[in-house]
Image (tube, grey):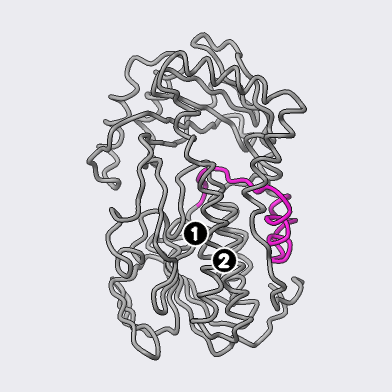
Amino acid sequence: MTKQTKNLGHLTVLISGASVAGPALALNLARLGARATVVEKAPALRGGGFAVDFRGHVHRTVLTAMGIWDEIHARQTHMGRQTVVGADGTPRVDLPAEMMSGDVEIFRGELARIMYERTKDDVEYVFGDSIASLAQDADGVEVTFDKGAPRRFDLVVGADGLHSLTRRLVFGDESRYLRFFDHYVAGFDVPNDLGLDRTGRLYSEPGRAVCIGNYDGDPDRAGALLVFRSERLSYDRRDVAAVKRILAERFAGMGWETPAVLKALEAADDVYFDAIAQIHVDRLTEGRVALLGDAGFGATMGGMGTGAAIVAAYVLAGELALAGGDFRTAYAEYETRVRDFARGCQKISGNAGPFFAPATERRIRSRDRMYRLLGSRPLARFFKRLTEKAATGITLRDYPFEAPC
């Protein structure tokens, strides 16, 4: 941890969610002396998850200021090239590592662990519980929980993901804010039958795709990513058996390694499944409640959501510090400084589904031709600058954080 400043020592903040945005905000608030509590419905810190990447000088500036840049580098995936293949496994296109993995890439669970370890002595973490209700008044927020006793806080921040409960309680039903992008994505572990070593393979048929990658060098384990085009589906995200049936039906008869992937799916005990979607809210704050990360400006994949969440957490804490804890002033600045930046990152995520699973054979061939060109050194540099433009689309103020130890 850092040597703490005490200008926010009077402030109590409840943060809902312990994935990435929540611990990032907690770390920055703790450096300013604020009393942060993180409540997380999972029984413990979640491990694993998809790999996330950081790009450009803004991400690096924030991660360095938070004191975690070097540790992220030490735990990075070192992911190499990913290859688009045909049904027989023949390579069609090589995608350079920097195109898919940015300047540095790390598993989401590893990133959360780094921030948790740096804050666990200064931040209260409450696992296995969730907010049940929020009631704001002139002096604070009265919070009831599913399990714990009611408590009162000065501020509440919803950092609880794309399907945020905090957002629903304060801002209204998810249907008002979620934009569906005609695709679904799933992820789970599979045996590393292809013998991959920090490389990946992507196979597409019209409207569906299977990607197998080895990100950590484990010779026995790989991860499968499945993407398919679809109308909106009605299902319970918590019903794993139903999710497995959907995937088995959608990918039945697909070539390449798909039968082996579906066989592994039968035994998988941790399956991620969600719509490819974005969250667009009218505002990021309401009274004493603020939204952060995917809860306020989420994109399921391809929108640099983790980088945007880390930067926004830094800005929110910094603005509270500059305002001396005056949340009205801080929230207004947070809204102004983060909104366009977050939207800029979201814009580049809209093509994630069609990239993995083009709708027709013709579009698959067109994608392959385009990425074959982008794989050349001059165009790869151009593509890198293009993605970094969104990641660097914010001017950071000089916030009163002391340098990390």
Q: CA distance from mark 2 to mark 1?
A: 8 Å
Q: Which residue is mark 2?
A: 313
Observer-nearest of 192 and 234: 234
Q: Residue at x 50, y 76 (%)?
A: 124
Quadrant into which the N terminus falls: bottom right
Quadrant into which the C terminus falls: bottom right
Q: Which residues are magenta?
A: 47-73
Give the side of residue 236 with respect to residue 216, left or right: left
Q: Quadrant of residue 336?
A: bottom right
Give the side of residue 81 with respect to residue 348, left or right: right
Pointer 2 local density, CA inside 10 Å: few below 14, some 14–19, many at least 20: many
Percent across and percent down for residue 105 are 65, 44
Q: Which residue is mark 1?
A: 293
Residue type highlighted by circle 1: Gly
Callout 2–callout 1 Cβ contact below 8 Å: yes
Q: Residue at x 32, y 29 (%)?
A: 247
- Helix, strand, or loop for circle 2? helix
Give the side of residue 186 with respect to residue 222, left or right: left
Give the side of residue 137 with respect to residue 74, left or right: left
Residue type highlighted by circle 2: Ala
Say which label, 2 or 1, has the lower sequence index. Answer: 1
Q: Quadrant of residue 227?
A: top left
Q: Residue at x 33, y 79 (%)?
A: 143
Observer-nearest of 363 and 205: 363
From what the image shows, is residue 30 above or below residue 217? Answer: below
From what the image shows, is residue 168 above or below residue 185? Answer: below
Percent across and percent down for residue 181 are 38, 39
From what the image shows, is residue 315 above or below residue 249? Answer: below
- Helix, strand, or loop for circle 1? loop
Q: Furthest-left residue in view? A: 234
